[in-house]
Image (cartoon, rainbow, N blue to C red):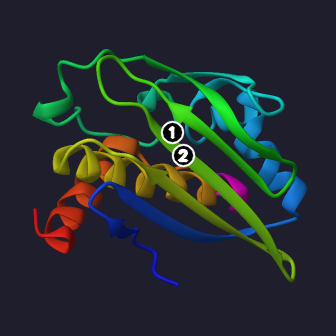
Amino acid sequence: MSEYGELIDNTTVRFERMLPGPIERVWAYIVDGEKRRRWLCGGNIGPGESGHVDMHFHNETLSSAPDIEAPEKYRDMPKEMRFTGTVTRWEPPHAVSHTWEFNDEETSEVCYELEEVGDRVRLVLTHRRLETTDTVLSVSGGWHTHLDILADVLEGREPRAFWKAHTTNEAEYQKRLGA
């Protein structure tokens, strides 16, 4: 298992992480807005197929560790961003998928799949229908960073600073994906 995401095709990236269980705990950190806001964003997912998704991102609040300013290409983005979507798959506590609708971009889809492996949980996250190479790079750096923060939270560690980690991760994806 690679810590780095894999490009499945030109519009799909896939990540895999082993996290401390049990599976119900990891599931809660994906679908419960109060828990999810500690590593990704607040807001609601579902419940149930066709459930509404409302996500409130505020990356600067994920850690108390000293951070850097957002990179130049992200400085025009609001400090707090909102995404909406619709649940397309709901199989507690093993899988949830939802659309990801943001501004004028094409709708993409995120799928979280969980599998128990002993006392650990394998999380496979797949983000499909990404519009451009730049979007693939940004999403890859973002998901990598957010999943590292999820691991920090579940392991009881202080979450890493978002922009510092994202900048490093996005540069690595540029090398790995040849962009």
Task: Give the quarter of the image for residue 97.
Answer: top right
Q: Which of the labelled discs sits on residue 110, or is there none?
A: 2
**What residue range appears in magenta?**
153-157
- Image coordinates of residue 56 in percent, x first then y, are 54, 20
Mark yes or no: residue 145 visible: yes
Q: Residue at x 80, y 50 (%)?
A: 27
Element under disc 2: strand
Horizontal arrangement in the rendering, residue 175 relative to residue 15 (left or right):
left
Residue in the foreground of this view, choosing between 156 and 31 = 31
Prevailing secondary structure of the magenta residues: helix
- Image coordinates of residue 53 in percent, x first then y, are 64, 24
Q: Residue at x 33, y 40 (%)?
A: 67
For marks 1 and 2, give the CA distance. Answer: 24 Å
- Image coordinates of residue 8 in percent, x first then y, are 38, 69
- Identified by mark 2, the residue type is Val
Horizontal arrangement in the rendering, residue 177 relative to residue 91 (left or right):
left
Does residue 42 lie above or below 121 as drawn? above
Nearest to viewer (mark 1 / mark 2): 2
Does residue 124 lie above or below 78 as drawn? below
Q: Which of the labelled discs sits on residue 63, or is there none?
A: 1
